[in-house]
Image: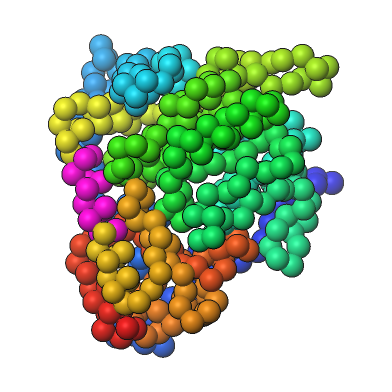
């Protein structure tokens, strides 16, 4: 008889986004005339930059000509793309990252989950609370956790609470953990990390032989010139950190799919016999076996992000979303709410008023102003009492949603 991976049965049923959809659909059915504005999803809304579309169109033409046709590409990604990433995203910021240390993939979400393939099951793993749910659920699936308790926490994980009290940056734990997930600028809170803060983590990781998984999906949204965009801006990070990046949010590739993971060749972890093994070799082996590369057409589209026109276009795109974030911040503040984030990240994190629970505030916004956001409690127990509003939307929708909130909620 075939059996299943029983770890999947530990996963929380009826997860966040299905529950949001259920409540929104029920409301829409009962109120067919309501004009619902969705500021809940973490997906982009604006079209792909022209430079990317042009490059992809040309790449399609390449595929139609025997001489320029491409079959399987390198599993790691084409060198012309990796070299541009290394030069522009890392070396230009003083990070000693070589093109050979970059792996192109079809998404950071998959890479964040797949990376667990090359790690043992006996690691102590730390996540912040609230957190991007992918980090937690992939550890559950991999069998790295116990069962979930009443608070929604999985046994075996170390939860590092973040809230307004610690400016949404977790305290460095006193206990030893082996794997640490950090996401800056942060989804869902919009919080950022200073170089000093990341240095403290790098020092911790080096002292304990830990590995940091650094998710920089939102680095392009950083407006403060003092903030680091990459963990490799911190001395010593090459010896303790893997970085995940994506074209999803900076260039609108959520539906096009292209991302990258950096595994420095200096990074090692222990084998069961106590020897040090290079993680680059394991990840290269994993990708070469289980992955066959990103489409040539899409990689050409990603390459165009680094052209002069592409850079100007993604700057405008990010500027557009950040203006939305500014409007959301200002209007919600005017409505008397305490708001966080939204300055170096496309998410505004709101304290629910009058001690309302995250879901009660969700229902209130839905029913009184027909605006949908994301309950903070869906990102972890410590997200209770908070609410996420996304800046990924049209200007018209953002302005209309904020007007309704100011008119009715103030
Ligand atoms: C959107 C997002 C990503 C990017 O995921 P892709 O699979 O590359 O689209 C990664 N991490 C976080 C926290 C995100 O919000």
23 and 209: which is toward the camera: 209
Residue occupying image coordinates x 34% and y 48%: 344
Q: Is residue 12 above or below residue 368?
A: above
What percent of the width, then of the height, locates residue 305? 25, 31
Q: Is residue 251 above or below residue 307?
A: below
Give the left or right position of residue 206, taking residue 61 as reference: right
Q: Is residue 388 in the magenta section?
A: no
Taking the image as drawn, is residue 335 in sight?
A: yes
205 and 13: which is toward the camera: 205
Residue occupying image coordinates x 37% and y 85%: 368
The C terminus - image quarter: bottom left
Give the left or right position of residue 139, taking residue 387 as reference: right
Which residue lies most toward the bottom here?
30
Q: How many marks?
A: 0
Taking the image as drawn, is residue 292 in sight?
A: no
Residue occupying image coordinates x 25% and y 46%: 318
295 and 134: which is toward the camera: 134
Prevailing secondary structure of the magenta residues? helix
What percent of the width, then of the height, locates residue 363? 47, 80
Q: Is residue 334 above or below residue 326?
A: below
67 and 339: which is toward the camera: 339
Q: Is residue 6 above or below residue 215?
A: below
What percent of the width, then of the height, locates residue 119? 69, 30
Give the left or right position of residue 146, taking residue 137 as reference: right
Magenta extent: 314-325
Residue occupying image coordinates x 71% and y 52%: 8
Which residue lies most toward the top here?
67
């Amino acid at each position: 008889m075939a059996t299943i991976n029983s770890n999947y049965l530990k996963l929380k049923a009826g997860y966040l986004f299905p529950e949001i959809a259920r409540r929104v659909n029920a409301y829409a059915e009962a109120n067919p005339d309501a004009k619902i504005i969705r500021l809940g999803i973490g997906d982009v809304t604006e079209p792909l930059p022209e430079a990317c579309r042009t490059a992809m169109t040309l790449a399609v033409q390449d595929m139609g000509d025997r001489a320029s046709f491409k079959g399987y590409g390198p599993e790691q990604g084409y060198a012309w793309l990796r070299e541009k990433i290394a030069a522009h995203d890392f070396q230009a910021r003083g990070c000693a990252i070589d093109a050979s240390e970059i792996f192109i993939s079809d998404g950071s979400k998959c890479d964040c989950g797949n990376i667990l393939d090359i790690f043992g099951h006996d690691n102590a793993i730390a996540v912040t609370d609230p957190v991007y749910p992918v980090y937690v659920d992939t550890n559950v699936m991999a069998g790295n956790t116990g069962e979930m308790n009443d608070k929604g926490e999985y046994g075996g994980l170390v939860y590092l609470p973040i809230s307004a009290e610690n400016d949404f940056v977790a305290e460095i734990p006193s206990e030893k953990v082996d794997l640490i997930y950090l996401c800056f600028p942060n989804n869902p809170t919009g919080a950022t990390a200073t170089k000093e803060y990341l240095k403290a983590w790098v020092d911790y990781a080096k002292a304990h032989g830990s590995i940091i998984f650094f998710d920089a999906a939102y680095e392009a949204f950083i407006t403060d010139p003092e903030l680091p965009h990459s963990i490799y801006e911190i001395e010593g990070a090459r010896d303790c950190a893997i970085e995940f990046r994506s074209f999803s949010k900076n260039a609108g590739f959520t539906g096009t799919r292209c991302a990258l993971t950096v595994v420095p060749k200096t990074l090692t972890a222990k084998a069961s016999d106590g020897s040090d093994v290079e993680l680059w070799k394991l990840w290269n082996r994993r990708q070469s076996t289980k992955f066959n590369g990103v489409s040539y057409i899409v990689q050409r589209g990603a390459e165009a992000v680094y052209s002069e026109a592409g850079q100007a276009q993604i700057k405008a795109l990010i500027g557009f979303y950040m203006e939305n974030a500014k409007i959301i911040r200002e209007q919600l503040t005017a409505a008397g709410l305490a708001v966080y984030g939204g300055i170096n990240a496309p998410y505004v994190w709101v304290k629910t008023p009058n001690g309302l629970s995250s879901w009660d505030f969700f229902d209130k916004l839905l029913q009184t102003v027909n605006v949908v956001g994301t309950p903070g409690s869906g990102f972890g127990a410590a997200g209770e009492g908070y609410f996420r509003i996304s800046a990924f939307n049209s200007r018209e929708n953002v302005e209309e949603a904020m007007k309704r909130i100011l008119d009715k909620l103030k």
